[in-house]
Amino acid sequence: MQGTCSSFLSYETALALNLIKLTINATENQQPEVQEKNKLKQSLDKYNDRYHGVGKLKDCQVHLHINETVTPSAQPHRRIPFHLRKGLEQELIRLEHESRIEKVYGPTPWVSPLLVVPKPKHPEKVRLCVDMRVANKAIDRERHITPTIDDLINDLNGATLFSKLDLNQGYHQLELAPESRYITTFSTHKGLQRYTRLLLELPQQR
């Protein structure tokens, strides 16, 4: 405000209308936050076994709609650079330990190549990307209608409590049905592997 003028409301009136708040001890406002952190820590300690790994949605398996008339393709193996092999081996061990992938024995009609990318912030670690472009031609995509903003507003009408949940690697929390896993087979310098969980490269994830 420029110039000199008087206030429309006095200090007492603004305080009575709760337009301003007089804080005597600023540390009192931090108390609820501290209590919430303590509650969170207690919950993490109590359910410690629930907060490790990716987890898996109970009683749910994803069945891929595979078009059996499409001719299977076992693509040639893409050589992995030597400086990335150690990181790849560690990642394969981790994913297999978490039951996200499994070894493949015997003949398999579908084999996709693997692309290994070092992580920018941790070059010693790698990210696995399966080139599913050929295999995806045999997978029929399910169509779902995405709700509009108006639909969401109507569904939330009358709601007073809201939560924001961010699933950690949510697609890996969905188990692939055993009969659908063969099409996710990929090749590594250590042999063939396939996914037991839903992977991002499938058409259902796009």
Image (cartoon, rainbow, N blue to C red):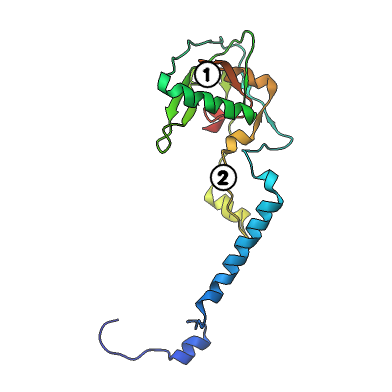
Describe residue 42's horizontal placement relative to residue 72 as left or right: right
Quadrant of res 9: bottom left
What x and y, as percent, mark residue 128? 49, 27
Three-letter code for the amino acid on which mark 1 is drawn: Lys
What x and y, as percent, mark residue 121? 41, 38
Quadrant of res 181: top right
The residue depicted at 61 percent of the width and 26 percent of the height is 96
Label 2 to label 1: alpha-carbon separation: 27 Å
Disc number for residue 147: 2
The residue depicted at 64 percent of the width and 26 percent of the height is 196
Residue 195 higher or lower than 173, as above or below: above
The residue depicted at 58 percent of the width and 26 percent of the height is 93
User: How many neighbours does mark 1 have within 10 angstroms: few (below 14), some (14-19), or many (20 or more)?
Assistant: some
What x and y, as percent, mark residue 31? 58, 71
User: How many neighbours does mark 2 have within 10 angstroms: few (below 14), some (14-19), or many (20 or more)?
Assistant: few
Residue 82 higher or lower than 42, as above or below: above
- In this view, the residue in front, 142 or 103, is 103
The answer to whether the residue labelled 2 contacts the one labelled 1, judged by CB atoms less than 8 Å apart, is no
Name the residue carrying label 1.
137
Helix, strand or loop under label 1? helix
Q: Is residue 39 visible?
A: yes
Q: Quadrant of the N terminus?
A: bottom left
The residue depicted at 58 percent of the width and 30 percent of the height is 94
- In this view, the residue in front, 156 or 73, is 73
Helix, strand or loop under label 2? loop
Three-letter code for the amino acid on which mark 2 is drawn: Pro
What x and y, as percent, mark residue 124? 44, 31
